[in-house]
Image (tube, grey):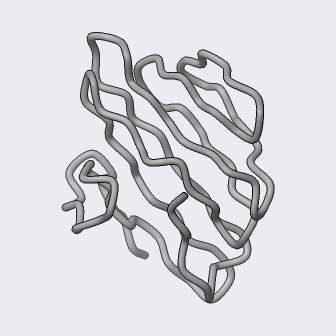
Amino acid sequence: MKIVNAKEAPGGPNPHNVKAAQVYDSEHAMVVHLTLEPGQSLKRHLTPVDVFFYVLEGTGIVEVGDEKQTVGPDSLIDSPARVPHCWYNEGDQTLRVLVVKVPRPIEQTRLL
């Protein structure tokens, strides 16, 4: 059995310059634990596979395609493959989100 504490997992370098820790990786799916501190955001990008986001903590603004919505804990957001998306933390608390990519991508994410 493998147990990962997502909050304590080290984040690796990424083009968004935020803490993003890969906490699960198999041939079928990938899960990233994303932490955005107040004022941080992701760059708008495309993911080559379907993604869903699950908000663990905090409130943020998620943008998928032409839609923007403020979301909080226990929200699950669907983001289809190749649709531009990004996150913004305009609040005063940490925003933590699980990013689940299915199937596991074999192409890189593309920044816009």
x and y, in percent, of residue 109 in the image: 55, 71
x and y, in percent, of residue 83 in the image: 75, 54
Q: Quadrant of residue 67?
A: top right
Q: Is residue 42 above or below residue 74?
A: below
Could you tell me which residue is drawn at 42 percent across and 25 percent down?
57
In depth, the one of 4 and 75 nearer the eye is 75
In depth, the one of 31 and 44 nearer the eye is 44
x and y, in percent, of residue 59 in the image: 46, 17
Q: Is residue 103 above or below residue 62?
A: below
Left or right, residue 21 beside residue 31: left
Among all residues in the image, which is located at the extreme top? 92
Left or right, residue 47 beside residue 38: right
Q: Quadrant of residue 81?
A: bottom right
Q: Is residue 98 above or below residue 101?
A: above
How many marks the image carries: the answer is 0
Q: Quadrant of residue 77?
A: top right
Quarter of the figure with the N terminus:
bottom left
Could you tell me which residue is drawn at 55 percent across and 58 percent down?
112
Left or right, residue 81 beside residue 23: right
Could you tell me which residue is drawn at 32 percent across and 62 percent down?
15
Among all residues in the image, which is located at the extreme front? 112
Could you tell me which residue is drawn at 39 percent across and 65 percent down?
23
x and y, in percent, of residue 65 in the image: 75, 41
Q: Is residue 102 above or below residue 112?
A: below
